[in-house]
Image: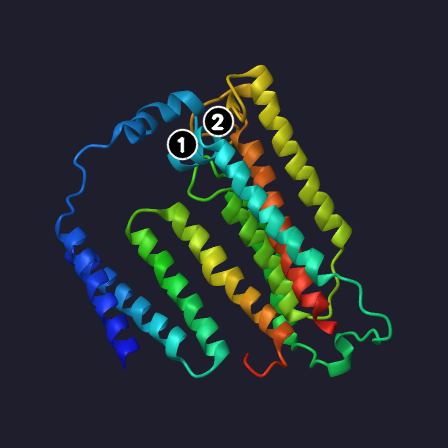
Amino acid sequence: MSTVMFVMSLLLACAMIASAYVALRGQSLSMAVLAAGAVSLFASVMFVLLAAPDVAMTEAAIGSGLTTFLFFFVMGRVKGGKDD
Amino acid sequence: MIKKFVALLLLAGLGLMFVGLLLGFTPDQVLNTTASYYADHSVEDTGAANIVTAIIVTYRGLDTLGEVTVLFLTATIVSLILTQPRPSGTPVIGLTEKKALASGELLQTGTRLLVPLVLLFGVYVFVNGHLTPGGGFQGGAILASALLLMLLSDPTKRFNHRFISRVESISGLLYVVIGVLGLVLAGGFLDNRILPLGAFGTLFSAGAIPVIYTLIGLKVGAEFSSMMVTLSESRDR
């Protein structure tokens, strides 16, 4: 693995950990959902670096795209409870 | 306090375990038996340029059928739970109760421009699944994301449920029929050699793989679409 690739994957890993931390500890729920989507997005770039383009496409389309919006649709439906 | 200490202890133990695993890890120098069989024989067996597709659709075709079934069950349960009839007495209120702000000209024009392109790209991804990375699941998700874009730009838009479920069930049925045809005409269930393998690397090659992946793409796209459409339309309850 060349140095550029190594630095890039290191940065990606740091970004993934940071967004995962935001998703867990963030103040608002929508922020957490967006951060979880960002984890998937960084993960899909990581999959490209690891030479798995098929997995990367699935992760980008389903993990960061559709799942995020499914969360938002569900949040729109459960709104009104005290604990959401 | 004790709880935190136990959690920390657990984390430290897990970390120690993973560090041990990482230090003891050496990548294999040669492929193992199954992997080397796939690498050596997938071209002559299936004629697909993308080995991942060859494995997913033919060697592990039954697993793919299982995955599609899981997705189908999920979509079915979502629409079953969310379309329960309203209890009598509650008024039927639509989205109009909130008088949602109409989306702007930019968003509407952008959507009209982008939706056909996104749909086309989804179809491209699953039709070329045997040549390039991607395939039925990815293409289907891209199709559904075009629908999602339409839904986001106009939340009051209504889609034809009957059409979506027709596409879903017909492609699922054809998928199983092709699998059984493989059992009758070729080597086994979901064997792709019921159609000629064709010239390696061209669009019409790899036997039934493009047909199967097109069906999977339509099925997955319809399932995701029905899930999102049900979730967004049943907000009124």
Residue designated by label 2: B206
Q: Position of residue A18 (x, y in %)?
A: 31, 73
Amino acid type of the residue tagged 1 in the rendering = Ala
Amino acid type of the residue tagged 2 in the rendering = Ala
Q: Position of residue B171 (x, y in %)?
A: 66, 38
**Relative horizontal placement of residue B141, taking residue B166 as reference (left or right):** left
Q: In terms of image quadrants, where is residue A75?
A: bottom right
**Relative horizontal placement of residue A27, taking residue A74 as reference (left or right):** left
Q: Residue at x 57, y 40 (%)?
A: B216
Whether residue B60 is visible, yes or no, is yes
Q: In terms of image quadrants, where is residue B134?
A: top left
Q: Residue at x 63, y 50 (%)?
A: B223
Q: Position of residue A16 (x, y in %)?
A: 32, 67
Label 2 with label 1: CB-CB less than 8 Å: yes
Tell me the chain of label 1. B
Q: CA distance from mark 2 to mark 1?
A: 8 Å
Residue designated by label 1: B49
Residue situated in front as seen by the camera: B13 or B224 = B13
Q: Relative to B185, does residue B80 appear above or below in the rendering?
A: below
**Relative horizontal placement of residue A59, taking residue A46 as reference (left or right):** right
Disc 2 on helix, strand or loop? Answer: loop
Residue situated in front as seen by the camera: B202 or A62 = A62
Question: Dividing the image into 4 quarters, which one contains the C terminus of chain B?
Answer: bottom right
